[in-house]
Amino acid sequence: MFASLLLAAALSLPTLPPAEYADTEVVTNVALPAVRADSRLFSFRLELDATPSNNVSLVFGRDADEDGVLSRSEEALAVGWDCGEWKVVDCATGEETTEQGAPGLTALDWRLVAVPGLSPRSLEASVGGASVFSALRANPPSFLFDAGWNTLKVACRGLDAPSPQIDCSAENTPMTIRVR
């Protein structure tokens, strides 16, 4: 006999509305479910119709002033598609890591495991089953996860609607108990 325990905070975003203005930008801020202090697995999947002229950004951070909007100074990590390439940005320094992408229906799968103290230990990032962001995977920097994040900002831009689907979760490490 065995039992498994997995505690998680998960989020799936609904379809975004069409752009109201000529600049084609649609931005929404979503409160993230409370992340447990012992969360050690941070994962998301970003599916979209990628084109050379559209952009989808997932920006994670802590809404310190609790106004429901993630301002520039509150942003920590940005990940997404930008006009032909996948991009990860350390919002504190502006440092970018990019990977060439291919247009079409595609998805970025992200799975980061943190160690006690919540510093990143390992990162698996792939597009269509192929690994991406090898430099980040080799030595995951600390900006890739913070249990204090409470807001996700989603921004879409471009004439070609990317129709993103986003699933995000933070979990503690599963524990299995076996009794004989």
Image (cartoon, grey):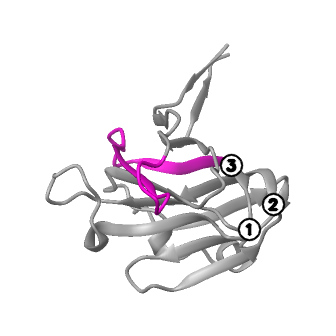
Label 1 crowd bin: few (<14), some (14–19), many (20+), radius 10 Å: some
The disc, 3 or 2, on the residue closer to the chain's N-terminal end is: 3
Give SS at disc 2. Answer: loop
On the image, which quarter does residue 118 sit in?
bottom left
Labelled disc at residue 52: 1
Give the residues drawn in magenta, as a range. Answer: 19-48
Q: Nearer the viewer, residue 144 or 128?
A: 128
- Residue 154 in magenta? no
Q: Position of residue 167 (x, y in %)?
A: 57, 40
The residue where tag 2 is placed is: 103
Q: Quadrant of the C terminus?
A: top right
Q: Position of residue 137 (x, y in %)?
A: 69, 71
Inspect the image, locate mark 3, and give the three-letter code of the amino acid beneath it: Leu
On the image, which quarter does residue 124 sit in?
bottom right
In the current view of this chain or complex, which residue is farthest to the top? Answer: 1
Taking the spot 45% from the left edge, 68% from the top edge, the residue there is: 77
Give SS at disc 3. Answer: strand
Foreground label between 3 and 1:
1
The residue where tag 3 is placed is: 48
Q: Distance of mark 2 from mark 1, alpha carbons?
A: 7 Å
Q: Distance of mark 3 from mark 1, alpha carbons?
A: 13 Å
